[in-house]
Image (tube, grey):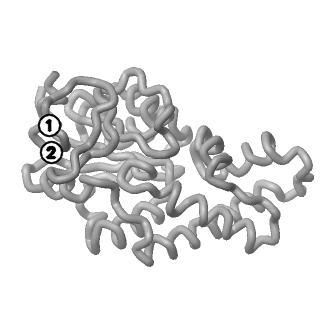
Amino acid sequence: MTLHALLFDVDGTLADTERDGHRPAFNQAFADAGLDWNWDAALYGKLLAVTGGKERMKYYIDHFRPDYSKPDNFDELVADLHQAKTRHYSALAAQGGIPMRPGVRRLLIEARATGLRLAIATTTTPENVTVLLEHSLGPGTPDWFEVIAAGDIVPAKKPAPDIYHYALEKLGLSAADCLAFEDSENGLRASLGAGLKTLVTINDYTHDHDFTGATVVLSDLGEPDAPNRLIAGPDLGQPFVDVAYLRTLHAN
């Protein structure tokens, strides 16, 4: 069984976009619309149980704002707010305010150099993916990814496995040929549902999630001079993730 491709989630996996990008962008969109909605860090952690920005806003109203009277055009309002949030997020990312997580750039460069194929499987919008990669990873880097499966391209978002099935179909590969990278329980459920071995890197919002079934759970990908921390899974005796590590992990 040979490793041929790496499939990456984006938010929380490639970069801490939830903390540094999406939450402040949501709050700015709410303020612009004259709404008294404000998502602090603790509340946002709870809302992340729901994937998809539009779905998250509806969940917030249903579960945290019983005082809010929905207008007749509520679905339209939510869609408009989501578009505004995307504009604010893009502006933040364009300022370079959302850095890649430790080890991400190094691993992507090495993976390309060794001939591994790269893909993205995420619930965020294609626009969010492109602006993040262009400004935080570098100009032209969206082209590093053979497939960018994003947003509403499939009917069911994570934890449904649809986005991974779509990416695998576009790559023309089976799940056994690939390794997925995730940061959350919902993401892991999606990748496992598609039959993918999965490496998880936790973050501030997901450190207490249930990662049963993950091939390995790490603090981050690590760097040669900044070791990561093994949380669960096999100890391969290396404190950072490189292609050799991934090939061993995939083969086990």
Viewer-side residue, 188 vs 82:
188
Q: Which residue is painted at 50% across and 72% down in the image?
A: 92
Circle 1 packing at 10 Å, graded few (<14), some (14-19), many (20+), is few
Left or right? Give the position of 191 relative to 1: right
Q: Are marks 2 and 1 in contact (CB under 8 Å)?
A: yes
Circle 2 packing at 10 Å, graded few (<14), some (14-19), many (20+), is many
- Point out residue 14 in the picture as x, y percentages from the top left corner: 35, 53
Q: Which residue is painted at 64% across and 47% down in the image?
A: 42
Quadrant containing the N terminus is top left
Quadrant containing the C terminus is top left
- The residue beneath circle 1 is 238
Left or right? Give the position of 249 relative to 91: left
Q: Quadrant of residue 73?
A: bottom right
- The residue beneath circle 2 is 242
Viewer-side residue, 152 vs 68:
68
As drawn, 106 above or below 139: above
